[in-house]
Image: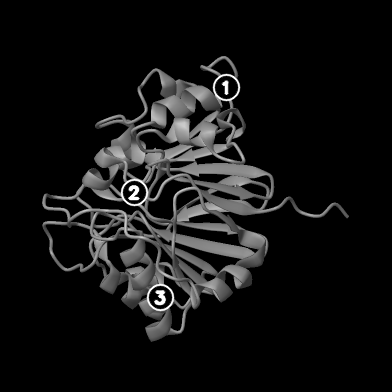
């Protein structure tokens, strides 16, 4: 029997919302999943293509099998057309899958209309819909998020692994049930405190509430805003670990997470020392 390919998650960028993105204090390249032969790129924001090509190991856009856009905000889709162009060699080699909400394809296209013809398949994200991305690998959007535009988090399933990614949203009581049963839980954690509808993002307090309810094997905070530079993000993750008993880490730009060895990452969660602070004051305007 041929052993399964090594499974990883690459954080090309961990920037959350407009000020972290516009300053590039954190990068905005999105996430790249490598699962059982399938390469899935989620939310390539501004600079994503450059981050992919300069990362080590390099992410080859021409080998991406699926591009997923969770919603039509710049920090999630700024390089979407560039990735589609690279994925399909400028449309001369139609291949791969593009998934996005309908309003991101039609109302205000984040992938230019001409380039939407380049992938072999274009699918629409909608509540409760499941998409097959490769043999044994599926992506499901369990519930629409509360984020001002059509927005979806997702559940990604492969043999022996179920991951959930709670993307940008205001707190919803439906979230714990929607993402229950995952081994790995990613939480877009843009602010220190949630609960303010001017900012339709989760805070670290919301992330703790969600982690405590879902209880994954490992939780990871990402999409971090100006209120959560590395030192504060690490401290917030450590406090979530201590209070919930669920190992929790704050992602860093360029981090490669070994999905075949989540216990090793979980073991680091309780001992990670806060890093040097790298970020100025809290965000002051409406979040993107």
Q: Mark 1 — residue?
A: 94
Q: Where does residue 132 sit, x and y in percent of width and height? A: 58, 47
- Name the residue beneath numbered marker 3: 238
Most foreground residue, 206 or 276: 276
Q: Do labels 1 and 3 touch, CB within 8 Å?
A: no
Q: Is residue 207 left or right of residue 201?
A: right
Secondary structure, mark 3, is helix
Residue at (60, 42) in percent of width and height: 39
Q: Determine the secondary structure under disc 1.
A: loop
- Where residue 259 appears, as percent x and y from the top left, is 62, 60
The Cα–Cα distance between marks 1 and 3, rounded to whole angstroms, is 45 Å
Q: Are marks 2 and 1 in contact (CB under 8 Å)?
A: no
Q: Is residue 78 above or below residue 37?
A: above
Residue under pointer 2: 15
Horizontal and vertical percent for residue 15?
34, 48
Query: Closest to the observer: 75 or 106?
Result: 75
């Amino acid at each position: 029997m041929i052993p399964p390919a090594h499974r990883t998650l690459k954080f090309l960028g961990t920037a959350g919302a407009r000020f972290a993105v516009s300053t590039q204090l954190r990068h905005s390249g999105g996430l790249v999943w490598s699962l059982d032969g399938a390469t899935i790129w989620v939310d390539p924001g501004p600079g994503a293509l450059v981050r992919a090509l300069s990362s080590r190991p390099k992410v080859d856009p021409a080998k991406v099998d699926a591009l997923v856009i969770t919603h039509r905000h710049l920090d999630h889709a700024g390089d979407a057309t560039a990735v589609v162009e690279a994925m399909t060699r400028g449309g001369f080699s139609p291949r791969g899958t593009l998934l996005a909400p309908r309003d991101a394809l039609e109302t205000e296209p984040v992938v230019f209309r001409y380039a939407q013809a380049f992938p072999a398949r274009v699918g629409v994200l909608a509540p409760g819909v499941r998409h097959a991305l490769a043999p044994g690998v599926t992506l499901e959007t369990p519930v629409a998020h509360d984020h001002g535009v059509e927005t979806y988090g997702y559940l990604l399933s492969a043999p022996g692994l179920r991951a959930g990614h709670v993307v940008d949203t205001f707190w919803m009581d439906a979230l714990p049930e929607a993402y229950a049963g995952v081994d790995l839980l990613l939480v877009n954690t843009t602010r220190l405190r949630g609960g303010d509808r001017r900012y339709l993002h989760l805070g670290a307090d919301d992330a703790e509430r969600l982690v405590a309810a879902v209880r994954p094997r490992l939780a990871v905070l990402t999409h971090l805003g100006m209120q959560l530079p590395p030192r504060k993000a690490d401290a917030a993750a450590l406090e979530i670990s201590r209070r919930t008993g669920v190992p929790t880490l704050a992602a860093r730009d360029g981090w490669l997470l070994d999905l075949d060895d989540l216990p090793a990452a979980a073991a680091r969660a309780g001992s990670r020392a806060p890093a040097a602070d790298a970020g100025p004051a809290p965000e002051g305007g409406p979040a993107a």
